[in-house]
Image (cartoon, rainbow, N blue to C red):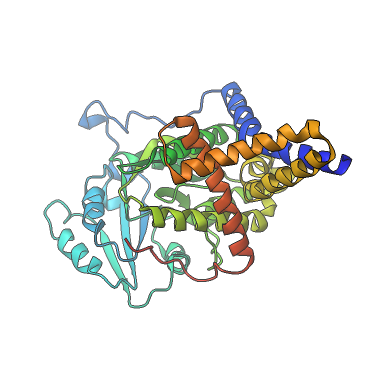
Amino acid sequence: MLTAGGLLIFCGGLIVYHHFGYPLLIRFLAQRQPNPHYPVAPELYPRSPDDALAPEHWPPISLIIPVYNESAHIAEKIRNLALLDYPSDCLEIRFIFDGCTDDSVDIAEKTLQEPLCQHLPCILQIEEQNQGKLQQLNRAIPKARFEIIALSDLSALMAVDALKLAALWFKRKHIGAVCATYRFLSNAGTQEQSYWHYQCSIKQAESQIGSTLGAHGAFYLLRQSLFQPLPLDSINDDFILPCRIVEQGYRVVYDPRIIAIELESSALEQDFQRRLRISAGNMQQSLRLTGLLHPKLGHTSWMFFSCKWLRPFMPWCFIGCFVASIWLSLISYWLSPILLLQLLVYGLVIKQQLQPGTQPALVKLHYLISGHVLGLIGGIDYLRGRYQQPWKKVSH
């Protein structure tokens, strides 16, 4: 009985801490910190043309955008870049067409001929064979012209002031990377919207205390000199890359004023595959980024352990609680309510899966538990070596 009770307390304690204790604690600590000193300057929103900074005062930026069969969105992306408020003389924009089999290249060439887009300093790098996003990034980032590197998904639009807001951060020498916030244009379910709102609030709190862990791949920036080539089997590259910068002693900040909007919606099958892959990546990063657990990193090591490192092991904690509850209920009738409560919760989740409802509590509970089920499958898939090949875009 002591063994079963200990297992229940241990696993249950980790579940409560990961889902409730840590979020409450990180927000409490963030509120006690001084207000974040977001860089705001008259040159960002000048009162008159005379107050604006000359182009040479803005740091040059190399924007790298991998492309794989993005004919649906590439024209919108190019027009979006043409509207950004940043001196074109301070930009290098490189589209890397990674073995595209659609007409993405043709659409890009035609769009760049439009009057709105003719001023863009774009390079269309066409690769005949698909070599994977990471292979292309490992080659392109070290060869980029400028020290500040911006990475963006092609399916994400950037706010008109995104580059200027981000560039101001890099005037501070201890800043190694800057992350934007992430929003959906349409068709994101209530579950996903709620989850991303939660994630953004955690990232903002982490940034106020030390460094945010990971970035939204839609748009983030880093110093070229801090880039470390990624292993080609890396899954969540937008998490691993910023974390490698944190390991070098630099801060990674999250600025909610910098906005990227995701155009692409996911069908149910796509969402399932995406969440499976992210879950496999969670297991991978927990095993590979153990350097972030070193106490020398202070708050960052605690945040990594509490939020990211524990995540792929949560499904096993749920299993541990369930097994311990069965064991205890067989030993003592008075302990059976612990098992019955879990059966009730899982029964409600199954009902929501089979007959989707709109009650907010059930919707969130279903998203949480289904996420851990996918986390279990994705983690096992990673340990079995399933995710060893370059990522390819899921077909619509």
Q: Residue furthest bottom?
A: 128
Q: Is residue 90 left or right of residue 389?
A: left
| Quarter containing the C terminus | bottom left
Q: Position of residue 259 (x, y in %)?
A: 36, 39
Q: Position of residue 340 (x, y in %)?
A: 68, 36
Residue 11 seen in the current view = yes
Taking 381 as reference, is 297 above or below it? above
Q: Is residue 302 left or right of residue 127?
A: right
Q: Closer to the camera, 157 or 281?
A: 281
Q: Quadrant of residue 206?
A: top right
Q: Residue furthest front?
A: 333
Q: Closer to the camera, 114 or 171?
A: 114
Q: Closer to the camera, 174 or 185?
A: 185
Q: Position of residue 387 (x, y in %)?
A: 54, 67
Q: Position of residue 219 (x, y in %)?
A: 40, 48
Residue found at x 24% / y 58%:
72
Residue found at x 27% / y 52%:
89
Q: Is residue 63 left or right of residue 389?
A: left
The mark total stands at 0
Q: Is residue 287 left or right of residue 84?
A: right
Taking 55 as reference, is 129 above or below it? below
Q: Closer to the camera, 142 or 25?
A: 25
Q: Residue furthest right?
A: 2
Residue 367 seen in the current view = no
| Quarter containing the N terminus | top right
Residue found at x 44% / y 49%:
221
